[in-house]
Amino acid sequence: MTGTLYGVGLGPGDPELMTVKAARLISEASVIAYHCARHGRSIARSVAEPYLREGQIEEKLVYPVTTETTDHPGGYEGAIADFYELSAKRLAEHLDAGRDVVLLCEGDPFFYGSYMYMHERLSGRFEAVVVPGVTSVSAAASVFGRPLVQRDEVLTVLPGTLPAPELARRLADTDAAAVLKLGRTFSSVREAFAEAGKLDDAVYVERATWGQQRIEPLASVDPSTVPYFSLALLPSPAYASRVSPAAPVPSPSSGGEVVVVGLGPAGPEWLTPEAAAELSAVEHIVGYGPYVARVPQKAGQQRHASGNRVEADRAREALDLAASGARVAVVSSGDPGVFAMASAVLEQVSLGHGTGVRVRIVPGVTAAQAAASRVGAPLGHDYCVLSLSDRLKPWEIIEKRLDAAGAADLVLALYNPASRSRTTQLADARAVLLRHRAASTPVVVARDVGGPEEDIRVTTLGELDPSTVDMRCLLIVGSSRTRSENGIVWTPRSY
């Protein structure tokens, strides 16, 4: 009979916040294991001490390195990996001998816990049981006396070791947050909160539930006083809005404006100087999550990311923000006036939303222009832009327009050619166009233009395989005059 490995969460530090199960297992175990630095003191052991008994074997798992340098040939990661292997062997000796081992872990074993490294090395050989514990995040909220999240709010847990720009982006995109692993990262974490415009709402909590706990506004903390056992907390904004005095609401005449901005088809190199200047000047960014993430972070700027199919909700949110006096940018990929947010915003204005709000449109490079540039000049003569999505218009209308464009011998730029739920439209569109075009008509299939997965293929209307096309593609179907030679596609300007 082999022993059982128990990863026991001790909670945030107060021994009375340990679970009943954790206390029982600690008192019953033959072996108590815990991590510690070279000085030999263990916070985990001090929390569990009221439940220890005489005669138990104690295994100190002493880290070979914490924050200092090492001469290990594999560097810090190599030294730690060797340490975990050696620690696993020591615990395995007890388990092989039939002794149950409790490995103590502050907080929760599977929440940034050191236990997980033993679990992945030993759970395949021995029975392994994890006992959850109260996390430092829950403890911090309880001692601060504010809810973490409520209703539909989103909580994001982040390590302070992330680069400040990435941390700022994620903080801007969430409602509530907890940032752990402070210590030496504190200055960059505070910088990220400032960049996200949320520094004044954040609180610093140190050693929550311990006798020496400390709580104060994040903005006022001296970085030199910050230990590892601390976190930055951004609690529920909805709760804060109810218990804090509301700020006066400016009138619409105080400068509220919505600017609908085209980001171009991909990265910052496709962004126009005019669009970049507008994005830098606004107080709020509203848009589909992946598009909002492409906007460079600016200090104090609030971000409002949402899903792909809530254009009307997005437009109303932007208009409501602007109605309170704010300057708001609604972002779209490509050009906002081409199957994008400009018409969605103007439609909501026509329905009575955002009374008194100014609305401006800032153009961007379209997906059709970007795709055409990769192969030459297929849009060199008259062309038609058409979406194959039947989510907002019936297929009968699409088919009628395809037939008319085909009969008129127009080059076609086809947006939204396919998706997981729309798998037949492109094949039907191809059949309609073949009524008017030769099978040898050049077709450009452009996927993720400007992005990391860019793929440009030139085929023909007869050989086009609809199964190779997805929502990230744009197609350009040539006219009877379009030429294709050695991967270069162009449409002559004269007939």
Image (spheres, rainbow, N blue to C red):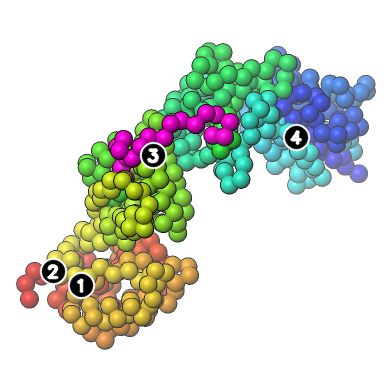
Pointer 2: what residue?
A: 381
Q: CA distance from mark 2 to mark 4?
A: 67 Å
The span from disc 2 to disc 1 (Cα, nearest Å) is 8 Å
Q: Is residue 269 visible?
A: no
Location of the N terminus by quadrant is top right
Looking at the image, do the residues carrying marks 2 and 3 touch, with CB atoms under 8 Å apart?
no
Kindly indicate whether the residue at mark 1 contacts the one at mark 2 (C-beta within 8 angstroms).
Answer: yes
Q: Which residues are magenta?
A: 241-258
* Amino acid type indicated by mark 4: Gly
Q: Nearer the viewer, mark 2 or mark 3?
A: 3
Q: Residue at x 18, y 62 (%)?
A: 376
Q: Is residue 430 left or right of residue 48?
A: left
Residue occupying the point 43% across, 31% down: 248
Query: Which numbered tag is attached to residue 133?
Result: 4
Residue 210, by quadrant, is top right
Residue 324 numbered mark, or none: 3
Q: CA distance from mark 4 to mark 1?
A: 63 Å
Q: Tag 3 or tag 4, which sits nearer the N-term? A: 4
